[in-house]
Image (cartoon, rainbow, N blue to C red):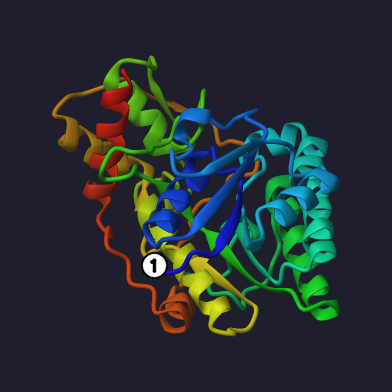
Amino acid sequence: MTDECILVTGGAGYIGSHVGLALLETGRRIVVVDNLVTGRRELVPDAATFIEADIGDAAAIRNVLRDHDCSAVMHFAGSTVVPESVADPLKYYRNNTGASRNLLEAVVDVGVSKFIFSSTAAVYGNPETLPIDETASLAPVSPYGKSKLMTENMLQDVSAATPLRYIALRYFNVAGADPDGRSGQSTPNATHLIKAACEVACGTRDKITVFGDDYDTPDGTGVRDFIHVSDLAQAHVTALDHLNAGGASDVMNCGYGSGYSVREVLDTLRKVCGKDFPIETGPRRPGDIGEIYAETKRIRDVLKWTPQHDDLEKIIASAYAWESRAT
């Protein structure tokens, strides 16, 4: 147990709120900075210190880091919708790349030396081989993926020039909700498959659309590596432990290493909720790829990370339970 203080940017959001809970369970103190554009104040744990601010405001972040004696930063704030990034790329370069640059300036100025970054498998683009490992070529096909890769590049450069050490976790498809019901995905008009499908099953959305059924996959629909948000949260805690122990900077995939198709997900949700719901087929979305799943050897070996929720039915059941409570 430790009483160190961690700055959690975007901590009123889906992933950030779960990581906040995981950090508090270790005895750490957390300061959540969120501008509440997409975050929800009620998702911030009661034990956290909450500050409404923009992470692109370097002066404000410097004050937060100093005032609360933060020893590390976990950075989740940003925009995350791939098709939106294609339609509005400048929003993504502002919210993801530009804001991260300002955040890093504040971190370096204050002398914080540990940084954990919420990156994405979208940095790989269309994988040449599967499972995809961290040495694969980086060729993102969306501004979202490009904006995240730019931040990875900044971290690499800053760590070469300063004492900063970092872990960039490349997320695959995060889903599910806290098993104890303390947090879940609350984003309005969410585009994530499991969240949207659970809304349909609960009657708060009219239908679920399968975007593309002509991919080169077993059933024609996209295949993704779905990881439970609580396992992802624990990966951040182990990443912090690694840096605290003097571990070197690194980039790691964060997934389970296997994929499920859109149709498999929807069939599993039907089993979980015991009812049918409207499904339609639409065209592929801009920026989407057919199939991707992770090679996870590095994160398991380096961080000794062992997932506890690697079960599609369990992931979907937790998401459905959260959505049912929200309706």
Tell me the kind of residue under disc 1: Gly
Query: How many numbered tags mark residues here?
Result: 1
Say which of 68 and 300 sits in front: 68
* Residue 181 shown left or right of residue 97 in the figure: left
Which residue lies at the image location 43% right of the left edge and 48% below the top edge?
18
Q: Is residue 132 visible?
A: no
Q: Is residue 231 visible?
A: yes
The quarter holding residue 231 reads: bottom left
Residue at the spot of label 1: 257
* Residue 242 shown left or right of residue 141 in the figure: left
- Label 1 CA crowd tier, 10 Å (few <14, some 14–19, many 20+): many
Which residue lies at the image location 20% right of the left edge and 33% below the top edge?
270
Expressed as whole percent of the image width and height from the top left, the position of residue 108 reads: 81, 65
- Is 233 drawn above or below residue 88 in the view shown? below
* Residue 66 shown left or right of residue 220 in the figure: right
Say which of 59 and 129 sits in front: 59
- Is 140 drawn above or below residue 45 in the view shown? below
Say which of 171 and 207 sits in front: 171
- Is 235 drawn above or below residue 220 in the view shown? below
Which residue lies at the image location 82% right of the left edge and 55% below the top edge?
101
Expressed as whole percent of the image width and height from the top left, the position of residue 284 reads: 55, 36
Secondary structure category for the residue under label 1: loop
